[in-house]
Image (cartoon, rainbow, N blue to C red):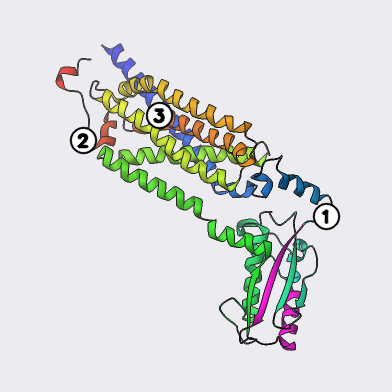
Amino acid sequence: MILSMLRNSSGAALRALAVVLALGVWLGIGSVGGVAQGQLSQVQTNDAAAFLPTTAESTRAAELTAQFVDTETLPALVVLEPAAGGQVSDEQVAAVQELAAGLGDLPLPEGTESGTWSRYLAADPVVAPSQDGQAILVIISLDGSAADQQLGEEGRVSTAFVSQLRTQLDEQLGATATSAGELGLHAWVTGPAGFVADLVTAFGGIDGVLLLVALGAVLVILVLVYRSPLLPLAVILTAVFALCLAGWVVYSLADADVIVLNGQSQGILSILVVGASVDYALLLVARYREELRHVEAPWTAMRRALRASLEPIAASAGTVVAGLLCLLLSDLASNRDLGPVAAIGIASAFLAVLTFLPALLLVGGGRARFWFWPRTPGPSPRLRSR
C-alpha cells in the first residue's frame, strides 16, 4: 500500500513537472514571438516584384529600366498654391525656398539614429514655380535604396520623412491642405513618397484590427458554444501563442532572406493561425470533455483525448500544409511567397493545440475541471470504476 502511494505521488509530481515545463517553454516562445510579431513589418517586401510573376512583361521592363538608372530615387512632391487664388508672390516663393533649403539640415526624429535628413536625400530639393505663377512645386528626392529602411519606431524612412515634412510646412509656413497660415498658402505632399506614406498610415493598423476582430468574434462564438466563461479564454490563449510562434519563425526566416514576406501574407497569416488553432482546439476539447465523463482523473482523460485527436488533427494540418506548399509552383510571386508563410502558421497552430492547450487545461491537477465551470463534466457513479 505504501509503495502504491509512493508511485502515485511520484507520478503526480512528474505530471505536474511536465505541465510546468510545457507552459514555461510556451511562455518563453510568447515573450520572444510577441516581439517578433510586432516587427514583421520591418522584414516585408512590398515592391511590385513581390507581387508580379517573374515572367511578366512589366517585371522584365522594370529590370531593364533599372540598368539605365544610376541612382534610384523616391520623389516627394510638395504642391503649394495661394489660398485666395491668383499669383504666387515673391515673398511666398522666398519662404518656400528657405524651407526647402533647410530640409536636409533637419535632425532625425528623437529616439532614432543621430544625424540629419541629408544622409537620406539623393539631391538638394528643387523649388519650381509654375509657368502661370499660380502654384509652387517642390521636388525632394529621397535615396531609393534607403527609403524602405526602418528608422527606429518611426517606421520606414520615407514615411518618417513625409511626416516631418508636413510638420515643417505647418510650423514654418502654416501651410497644410486645410490651413493657409500667415503666408496664405495651402500645401499638399504627394508623389510616390507621399502616396506610400498615406498608404502606410491608412493600412498600418489593419492587421491588428483584423486580429482583434477575429479573436473577439471567436470568443463570442466559443462562449455561446461552451456556455463557459473560462474555456474560451484557454482556446484564445492557445491561438495567441500559436501566432507568436509563427511570427517568430517567419520573422527569422524573412530576416535571413530564406522566405519573402509581404503585407498580404502577414494579414492572411494572422487570420489563418487563429482559425486553425480554434478548429483544432474544438476537436481536442470536445474529446477531452467526453473523456471526463468516463474517468475521474483529468490527466487520464487528457491522455485519452490526445490519443484519439492526434490522428485527425495531424491529417488535417498535414493536408493543409501540403496544399499550401503547392503554391510554391505558382508563377505569381505573391502566391508563391504565401505558401511557406501560411504553412508555418498551420504547423504552429498544430503544435500549440497539442502541447500548450493540454498543459493549460491540466492546470490545477485533480481540480482541472474548473475550466468547464459552471457545467463541470464528471463521471457518473456507474462509470467511476473504469
**Whole-percent x and y of residue 169?**
65, 76
Of marks 2 and 1, which one's residue comes earlier in the chain? 1
Query: What amino acid type is highlighted by mark number 3?
Result: Val
Query: What amino acid type is highlighted by mark number 2?
Result: Arg
Alpha carbon of mark 2 to alpha carbon of mark 1: how far?
70 Å
Q: Give the vertical position of 292 relative to 121 (above or below).
A: above
Task: Give the label, 2 or 1, closer to the camera.
Answer: 1
Q: Which residue is mark 2?
A: 375
Quadrant position of the C terminus in the picture: top left
The residue nearer to you, when weighing 386 against 160, is 160
Of marks 2 and 3, which one's residue comes earlier in the chain? 3
**Whole-percent x and y of residue 347?**
51, 31
Tally of numbered tags: 3
Query: Residue 238 falls in which quadrant of the image?
Result: top left
In magenta, the rendered stretch is 73-102
Q: Which residue is mark 1?
A: 69
Of marks 3 and 1, which one's residue comes earlier in the chain? 3
For the point 76% across and 48% down, which residue is it?
61
Is residue 145 a member of the stretch shown in magenta?
Answer: no
Query: Residue 383 falls in which quadrant of the image?
Result: top left
**Whole-percent x and y of residue 340?**
58, 34
